[in-house]
Amino acid sequence: MGVSLANNQPFYIQVRQSIKAKIESGEWKEGDLIPSELELSKMYGVSRVTIRTAISALVQEQYLVRKAGYGTTVYKNKSSLSNFTMIQSFTNEMDEMGLPSKTMSYELKMIEADHILASIFNVKEGTKLYNLRRIRGTAIPILYSDTYLLPVLNIPDNPEILKGSLYHYLASQNVFFSKFDEYVSAVHAPKNVRNLLQIYDDSPQLKRKRFSYGENNRLLEYTETYYNAKLYEYRTRLFYRKS
């Protein structure tokens, strides 16, 4: 079960993926106490520092929760991004491919819903919404996202928050999701988007629309994301979970 030197991914990512697979497949169930850092270190043949790094990442993703004086258990009783095996953040996707990721630029502002956004969110025109626009990638731009969010909480204009995972921040503020609808299509991206992604032809690009619903089945977030199709492959993974 140890990590593989032939795998070019860092050891902590290999461990993180292995533990995540155990949780998603149901081998480790909600509320289960997982092995100690020492036991996991022996199991995977890596240092305790590597195990600690992998566990910390899974705690942030809400796969695991640490309990002082007790140990680390599989997360339960909250609907969040990590409960959906088809839904991942861009940061996690890049991690799994062994690639560094970063937010290259961002802009957060408060806007008034036009008739299109009002229809999407089922609110009145003029309703205040957060609008977060980001360009993300590795060394070069890979995606441009345009996110609209109901102001169910205050989102500070803080680079550490806005350059990282928006879902992780929302979960840290006890804002969780119960359902996602996604639509992926091949489109000719608008010229301004092609410029932002440094695309210099009119070839089709990937466009994803995501509708994210809260625990009361109310739409909280709507995002349109354009991906440079030459640099990005959209992947999903499905697991069967026994009830």
Image: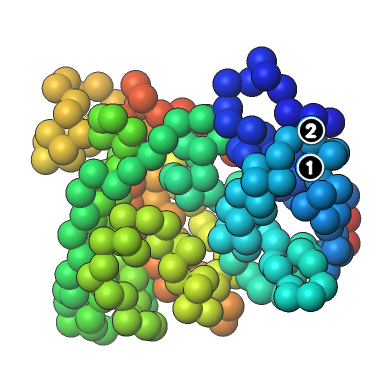
- Which residue shows up at 40% across the image and 29% down it? 232
Cβ atoms at labels 1 and 2 below 8 Å apart: yes
Residue 110 position, x and y percent, is 18, 75
Count of numbered marks: 2
Residue 98 position, x and y percent, is 51, 30
Q: Which residue is mark 1?
A: 41
- Which residue shows up at 61% across the image and 56% down it? 56
Task: Check disc 1: other Cα within 10 Å, few if <14, some if 14-19, many if 20+.
Answer: some
Q: Which residue is mark 2?
A: 45
Residue 88 position, x and y percent, is 53, 49
Question: Which amino acid, by three-letter code, is at mark 1?
Answer: Ser
Left or right of residue 138: residue 96? right
Is 70 located above or below residue 32 in the figure? below
Is 186 located above or below residue 81 in the figure? above
- Which residue shows up at 21% across the image and 34% down it? 197
Q: Quadrant of the N terminus?
A: top right
- Which residue shows up at 44% across the image and 68% down it? 169
The label on residue 75 is none
* Viewer-nearest residue: 52 or 188: 52
Taking the image as drawn, is residue 125 in sight? no
Question: Which amino acid, by three-letter code, is at mark 2?
Answer: Gly
Left or right of residue 41: residue 213? left
Residue 239 position, x and y percent, is 75, 45
